[in-house]
Amino acid sequence: MANPVEKPAHLKNPRRAFVKRNGKKLVRKIASFQSRQSKVPDTPKLSNDHFDFLSRFTENWETIQAEAREVLKFRDAIPTFHEVSPDQYRLSTENNWKTFVLFGFGQRLEKNAALAPKTSEILESVPNLQTAMFSILAPGYHIPAHKGVTKGILRAHLGLIIPKDREKCRIRVDDTITPWKEGEIFVFDDTYEHEVWNDTDEERVILLFDFDRPMKLAGRILNASFLNIMKLTAFYQDPKKNLQTAEDRLEAAIRKADANMEAMSDPAG
C-alpha cells in the first residue's frame, strides 16, 4: 500500500486548523439534534424503501455505466480526490482514487455533466442533491477508516464497473460489510466510521452521490444554515476552485483527442 501523502503546506495554516478543530466540535453537538429531527432511521445503512427516487438509478444503470466508460477514456485527465479536495490527503494518495464530479455542493458542473447527460438528468431528480461523482478506485487500494462531516447528509453508491471477484471489493460502514454489485444501489450515513478495500487487480467504478437527510422543519433549517456556513470556508472554496481547473483540463484533453482523430482521418495528412 502506498504511503500517505505529506500534508500540503497550506493546510498547516493555524487559522485553518482552528476552524477545522472547532468545526468538528460543532458538528458533534448538532448531530444528536439532527438525529432526533430525522424522518428516516439513524442507522449506518438505510433501506432503499425510504427513497423512491433510487429506482431510476437501478432501472437505468447500464446507461449510466456506458457514460462512465466514455468518461474513462480520458482517465489521465480525471483528477484524484486530493487534487479536488486537499483536505482528503490522508484518504487519497497518488493516482489511487480519482473523482469525476458532476455536481459539487449543489451546483451542476456543466462541462462534466455534458459528458454524462443521462446520468446528470437522473441525478437532478434527487431531492436536495449536494454532490455527485463517478468514483474510480485503483486495484489493490485501501481507503482507511474515516467519518463524514454532517449527519444532515446521506450517501448513495451505485455499482457500475465492479471486479469479477467482487467479495474482495467492499465497504465497511460501522460493523456492516457490503461488496458492490453492478446495478445495485444502497444508502448509508457516512458519519459512521467507514472504510473501503479493493483487494483485486481490477478497477472499481461507482456513482457516488450525497443528498440531504429527510428531516423535520427545524432540522432542515439547521442543515441549510450549516451548509451555507461551510460554503464560506476554505473547505468549500478550495474544491470549488479546483473543480473548475479540473473541468478545463478535461475539456482540453478532449479537444486534443478530437484533433488527433481528425488528423488521422484526414487523407491529406
Image (cartoon, helix red, strand yellow):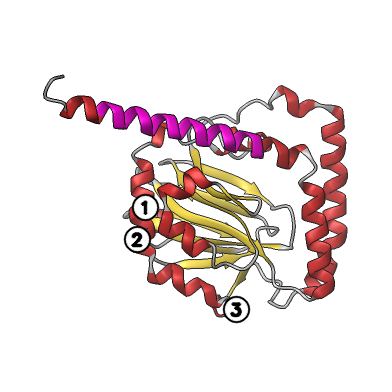
Q: Is residue 216 above or below residue 114?
A: below
Element at badge 2? helix
Label 3–label 2 contact, CB within 8 A: no
Mark seen at residue 63: 2
| Residue 134 placement (x, y as % from top left) | 47, 50
Residue 269 as seen in the image, left or right of residue 122:
left
Q: Is residue 259 magenta?
A: yes
**In front: label 1 or label 3:** 1
Residue 4 visible? The answer is yes
Marks 2 and 1: in contact by CB < 8 Å? yes
Circle on res. 50: 3
Q: x, y percentage for residue 185?
A: 47, 67
Residue at 74% x, 62% y is 151
Q: Is residue 7 above or below residue 127?
A: above
Q: Amino acid at mark 3?
A: His
Q: Amino acid at mark 1?
A: Glu
Q: Where does the magenta region start and end?
A: 240-260
Q: Is residue 1 visible?
A: no
- State the image coordinates of residue 179 (x, y, percent, origin top left): 45, 61
The answer to whether the residues at label 1 and label 3 have Cβ atoms under 8 Å apart is no
Sequence-wise first label, 3 or 2: 3
Q: Type of residue at label 2? A: Thr
Q: Label 3: few (<14), some or many (≥20) within 10 Å?
A: few
Q: Residues within 10 Å of mark 1 (few under 14, many from 20)?
A: some
> Which x, y percent locates residue 70?
34, 46
